[in-house]
């Protein structure tokens, strides 16, 4: 009789502690690889939501932001972005406390982003109510790095992805939250080496996981090359068992390299993706990169890692031509090589062309070092 009682209890315990697994599907069945896209800091300074306001519809329109990145987003099977703002539902503001209209999140999902990293220094900008409302707004999508409580973190972290025979775990942590700690029972993932060791140890017990990715918020703002702390931490993460390390926070694109882990694995490190979209108009911050990671479906090894630099244009586009898209002032993420190759249906003014070319040149130089 005792065994009959214990078996259901054991099963119930396993179910209660089972982690959520997200199922994705290849967008192109002919490919022998899975493509994951990573984007940097999706920010919202006050000028951005002022530009997004449509006086005719009385709504915010962020669609122009990601219009020209969509071909890359649509080609990727999984799209991950760092959301560096909060969605409290009212009293919108920019720096230093980012409080953003919900329409910006919906624009990210409409563009094709489907996993949202929240462990960053601005996640607590709206206090406890803002963090909880942000999580509620995003509840239909996988999020990582911030949680209602420890129980939710236990179930949802790391994000586990099943796709085309691969199982991928994605982790997320931040160096801090601008001295605004989460209010209990809310939880934010910090770069706590003891906690990270526990998280990766639990993950390594699951031998069905093929790849472990750390999306980490670190580094020094506006520093163009990674620092010694980032390098040392990246090596430590690689030695622990992480297979890919992707960075955000510095608001500029930093360099990248491949580290050799203690067990001989080659671990690519992208130290900073730079901004996805922001109102930072100065050199090196007025754009960023998206990173495209290809994982072979058969060998389950990293097949390729490539970068797409883009420039963020503030204003209107000249001669865009498509009547479906009025020539209005907004923020546009413009892939630099596509523009230089004449593939896009508009022209930029002389100043913007100079800035785009400079961002293209300097970004590629850093990535090739």
Image: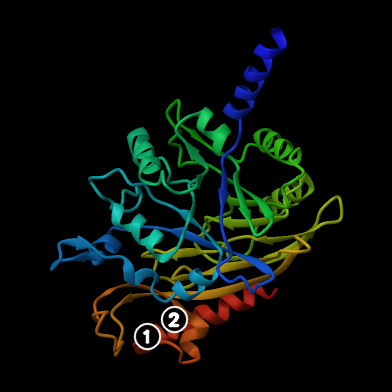
Picture quarter containing residue 315? bottom left
Q: CA distance from mark 1 to mark 2?
A: 6 Å
Between residue 256 and residue 134, name the one nearer to us. 134
Q: Is residue 364 visible?
A: yes
The residue that appears at 70% across and 48% down in the rendered structure is 233
Q: Secondary structure at mark 2?
A: helix
The residue that appears at 47% across and 41% down in the rendered structure is 177
Between residue 340 and residue 150, name the one nearer to us. 150
Between residue 117 and residue 259, name the one nearer to us. 117
The residue that appears at 45% across and 81% down in the rendered structure is 356
Picture quarter containing residue 344? bottom left
Q: Secondary structure at mark 1?
A: helix
For mark 2, what is the residue? 355
User: Where, quadrant-wise, is the N terminus in this rendering?
Assistant: top right
Give the image location of residue 136, x and y in percent: 37, 40
Q: Which label is found at residue 221?
A: none
For mark 1, what is the residue? 351
Residues under numbered marks 1 and 2 in contact, where contact means CB atoms less than 8 Å apart = yes
Give the image location of residue 131, x and y in percent: 38, 39
Between residue 170 and residue 93, name the one nearer to us. 170
Give the image location of residue 324, x and y in percent: 26, 80
């Amino acid at each position: 009789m005792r065994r009959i009682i214990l078996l259901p209890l054991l099963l119930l315990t396993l179910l209660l502690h089972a982690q959520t697994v997200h199922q994705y599907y290849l967008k192109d069945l002919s490919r022998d690889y899975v493509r994951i896209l990573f984007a940097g800091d999706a920010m919202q300074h006050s000028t951005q939501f002022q530009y997004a306001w449509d006086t005719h519809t009385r709504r915010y329109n962020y669609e122009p932001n990601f219009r020209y990145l969509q071909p890359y987003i649509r080609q990727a099977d999984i799209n991950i972005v760092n959301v560096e703002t909060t969605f409290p539902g009212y009293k919108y503001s920019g720096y230093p406390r980012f409080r953003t209209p919900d329409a910006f999140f919906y624009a990210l999902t409409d563009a094709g982003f489907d996993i949202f990293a929240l462990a960053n220094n601005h996640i607590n900008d709206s206090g406890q109510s803002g963090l909880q409302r942000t999580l509620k707004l995003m509840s239909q999508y996988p999020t990582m790095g911030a949680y209602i409580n420890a129980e939710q973190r236990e179930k949802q972290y790391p994000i586990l992805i099943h796709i085309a025979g691969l199982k991928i775990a994605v982790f997320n942590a931040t160096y801090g939250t601008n001295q605004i700690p989460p209010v209990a029972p809310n939880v934010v993932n910090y770069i706590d080496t003891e906690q990270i060791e526990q998280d990766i140890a639990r993950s390594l017990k699951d031998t069905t996981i093929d790849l472990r990715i750390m999306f980490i918020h670190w580094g020094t703002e506006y520093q163009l090359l990674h620092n010694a702390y980032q390098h040392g931490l990246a090596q430590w993460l690689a030695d622990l068992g992480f297979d890919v390390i992707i960075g955000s926070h510095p608001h500029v694109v930093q360099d990248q390299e491949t580290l050799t882990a203690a067990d001989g694995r080659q671990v690519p490190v992208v130290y900073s993706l730079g901004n996805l979209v922001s109102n930072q108009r100065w050199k090196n911050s007025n754009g960023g990169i998206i990173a495209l990671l290809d994982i072979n479906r058969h060998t389950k090894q990293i097949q390729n890692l490539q970068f797409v630099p883009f420039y963020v244009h503030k204003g209107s586009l000249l001669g865009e031509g498509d009547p479906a898209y009025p020539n209005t002032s907004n923020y546009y993420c413009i892939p630099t090589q596509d523009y230089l190759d004449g593939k896009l249906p508009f022209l930029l003014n002389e100043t913007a062309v100079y800035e785009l070319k400079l961002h293209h040149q300097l970004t590629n130089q850093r990535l090739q070092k």
